[in-house]
Image (cartoon, rainbow, N blue to C red):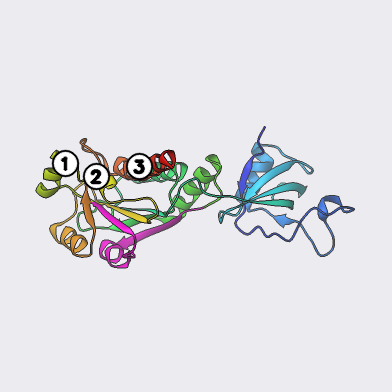
Amino acid sequence: MSLPLFYAPETLIYNPCAPGTRFGITSEKLPDRLPDDEAGHILRVLRMQAGDRLRLTDGRGSFFDAVIETADRKSCYVSVCGQESWQKPWRDRITIAIAPTKQSERMEWMLEKLVEIGVDEVVFIESEHSERRRIKAERLERIAISAMKQSLKASFPVIRVNIPIQTVIADTPKAAVRLIAYVDEAVRAEITQGRGYPSDFYHVGQDVLILIGPEGDFSPSEVESALLAGFAPVSLGESRLRTETAGLVACQWIHTLQACYRIGE
């Protein structure tokens, strides 16, 4: 049975369990206090007690084995007994830059699933045709933390909100594969020839950013700016997709291409 996983972003590796001390506690090595929300779940929902073992992640690529040292109604202190580095199962850096929908619940659902699938960065952009101009980062971060723990990952994705699309276009490194989910007549002509998909531009070993517009699509000036900056227009498939579905499909395209590469190695 696997140990429950909790998020402790400030966890430090100064608390190893040492022989001859109970859980490694000395005057120089005091237990780490878990965040209040995690402590509440541990104590009131799971009803864990002093001496119980659990697993922590700092969201920066490490798991920690820990033991509850002391616990009361408001706080939970643990002693860290070991560290394990986590290697993400996908290669390269995957960034999804997307215009939020009017209903924030749809973006929250998409973010949860992106984290479960595996993503390095999600950028919520401001576009001329955006239905929703502003989005709050705090709730999105809580959802991403929950999805990270649910999917047993130790890497918390970068989440950026309210970023103008022109900033994303200008700041994306030119060494990365830059794609824009936009289908015009030229792309349709490519599609009839079996081309015009992410697989025609992305190759394993390259970071990738996929730009996805609002349901009202990008404005002509935004498309022009992206193309002039070196973004390649691509189709995500024959179906017309909702914005949040397009975000998931774009991410899964990259994961599928990476899986095919591993099979062929």
Quadrant occupied by the C terminus: top left
- Quarter of the image holding residue 218? bottom left
User: In what element is the residue under mark 3?
Assistant: helix
Label 2: how many Cα within 10 Å (few below 14, some 14–19, many 20+): many
Sequence order check, earlier mark of 3 and 1: 1
Q: Is residue 72 visible?
A: no
- In three-dimensional space, the C-alpha distance between marks 3 and 2, rounded to whole angstroms, equals 15 Å
Disc 1: which residue: 191
Mark positioned earlier in the residue sequence (2 or 1): 1
* 203 sits left or right of 88 in the view: left
Q: Which mark is residue 197?
A: 2
Given residues 184 and 100, the one toward you in this image is 184
Q: Farthest top residue?
A: 1
Question: Do labels 2 and 1 touch, CB within 8 Å?
Answer: yes
x and y, in percent, of residue 244 in the image: 32, 43
Residue at point 81% right, 65% down?
A: 28
Instruction: Give how far across and how far down residue 2 sits, in percent.
Output: 65, 36
* Cα separation between marks 2 and 1: 8 Å
Q: Which residue is mark 3?
A: 248
User: Which element carries disc 2, helix, strand or loop?
Assistant: loop
- Compared to 4, does 160 lie above or below? below
Residue 261 appears in the rendering = yes
